[in-house]
Image: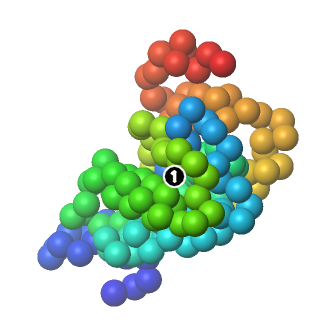
Amino acid sequence: MKSGSWGIVKNTYTQLRYHLVFSTKNRMPFITGELRGALYDYMGGVLRGHGGTLLASGGMPDHVHLLAGWGTTVSVAEMLKLVKGSSSHWLNDRPDAPPGFAWQEGYGAFTVSASQVPAVKRYILNQEAHHRKVSFLEEFRTLLEKHGVDFDPKTFAD
């Protein structure tokens, strides 16, 4: 099977990529530099363990961006439950875990066409520069608008 081809059901072929975004509970700055790389590696392992591939990871101390893909046997909701739940347990079991670490309820999941993968990778890998100008709430709201997702603007009041 060609690398990146995640369709695993006979006569079903998919190449779905998702830009996934989720934050720490109350957007607390828990994801420090020391934990960041290990956390992304762990999340990549969770994805691989369920037939997926992590194509890029990035974020800030209060949120994560993942570019990932997987086959048709695991729904987006189930994969996010697995990634968030497993990584939360893993992080809380570490001796250097920030006290009270948890993920915020919910997430954003946006499909990415093949032609946009390089741009989304750059965007994810350049989060620090991006967030010198834009807050997480502004960023998330923009992603929702760009992808035509209906939402309550009051949800994004600081």
x 31%, y 48%: residue: 77
Give coordinates of residue 103: x percent, y percent: 48, 44
Please give the name of the residue rendered at 84% of the width and 40% of the height, measured from the top-left corner.
Answer: 132
For residue 3, above or below residue 110: below
Q: Residue at x 44, y 83 (%)?
A: 3
Res. 6 visible in picture: no
Q: Left or right? Give the position of 92 relative to 36.
A: left
Task: Report crowding for label 1: few under 14, some 14 to 19, many 20 or more residues within 10 A (C-alpha).
Answer: many
Residue closer to the observer: 116 or 33:
33
Q: How is the image coloured?
A: rainbow
x, y percent for residue 12: 20, 69
Please identify the quarter of the rendering in which residue 75 is found: bottom left
Q: Quadrant of the C terminus?
A: top right
**Front residue (pair 117, 79):** 79
* Quadrant, the N terminus: bottom left
Q: Please, is residue 153 above or below residue 64 in the view?
A: above
Judged from this view, the residue extending furthest toward the top is 154
Q: Residue at x 49, y 45 (%)?
A: 102
Residue 67: where, in percent of width, then height? 53, 60
- State left or right for residue 86 relative to residue 57: left
Residue indicated by mark 1: 19
